[in-house]
Image (spheres, helix red, strand yellow):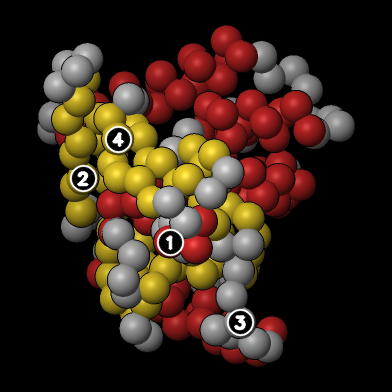
Amino acid sequence: MHIHGKVCLWEWEGVPLGATTELEACPSIKNILLLDSDGKRVAVKYYTDDWPTLAAKLAYEKSVSTKTLKTNARSEEELWTLFSAANELVLSFTAEITMFDSYIVVYKFVQDLHFFVTAGVDENELIIATVLQGFVDAVELLLRNEVDKRTALENLDLILLCLDEIVDGGIILETDASVIAGKVATHSLEGVGSLSEQTISQALATAREHLARSLLR
């Protein structure tokens, strides 16, 4: 997905998902959360005033964590599949979707890290899910597939940069994990300076192969 001026064009591997002529009509994100398995924040970004105080934000994080833990995201996966007839590719990813406090919440658990994206009830669930997966995959690339709380905290600056590349003011900027990770690597002063374009591509390909194997089980 890319935004050019005031035209919001959704595209996945050359397949357009829709377009709008006003930036205000683009899909909007209310927050992106990265929490640990106890519901404590690792990295969060809020883009609206729906939760005006720190106490309100912390309460939402704890509540959404508690609710989603009960649904066991790793065993009850929501499968999204997009077919590209043009290049005969099948792209798919898994995420869990729930309604919480009149919001759409798309989330995924990876070891002791829980990824969440919150949006309004009128937003397209598939688009919100692409934001989540872009975030998850970019973090996997930047952390060299060592996706756990300890490693995330040690590389918190990279994760915060990652969030800035995905969403700005609630408007989705980018969902391609390799592009996101590449921009973060470029802007980072240390820690990911050795991430080459080849390394990023290889890590992303490995993640996709792992997902494909899991879907065939």
Q: How far apart are marks 1 and 3 (CA)?
A: 19 Å
Report the amino acid beneath label 3. Asp
Q: How far apart are marks 4 and 1 (CA)?
A: 16 Å
Q: Mark 1 points at which residue?
A: 25
The secondary element bearing badge 2 is classed as strand
Q: Quadrant of the N terminus?
A: top left
Report the amino acid beneath label 4. Pro
Q: In this view, does 212 lie to the left or right of 56?
A: left
Q: How far apart are marks 2 and 3 (CA)?
A: 30 Å
Q: Mark 2 points at which residue?
A: 80
Which quadrant of the structure image shows residue 146?
top right
| Residue contact at pointers 4 and 3, CB within 8 angstroms | no
Q: In the rendered view, would you say 209 is above or below 98?
A: above
Residue 32 point in image, percent of width and height = 54, 62
Residue at x 49% of width, y 38% of height: 2
Residue at x 62% of width, y 50% of height: 163
Furthest residue toward right: 189
| Residue contact at pointers 4 and 1, CB within 8 angstroms | no
Q: Which of 114 and 24 is in front in this view?
A: 24
Q: Nearer the viewer, residue 181 or 126?
A: 126
The secondary element bearing badge 1 is classed as helix
Residue 140 point in image, percent of width and height = 53, 36
The secondary element bearing badge 3 is classed as loop
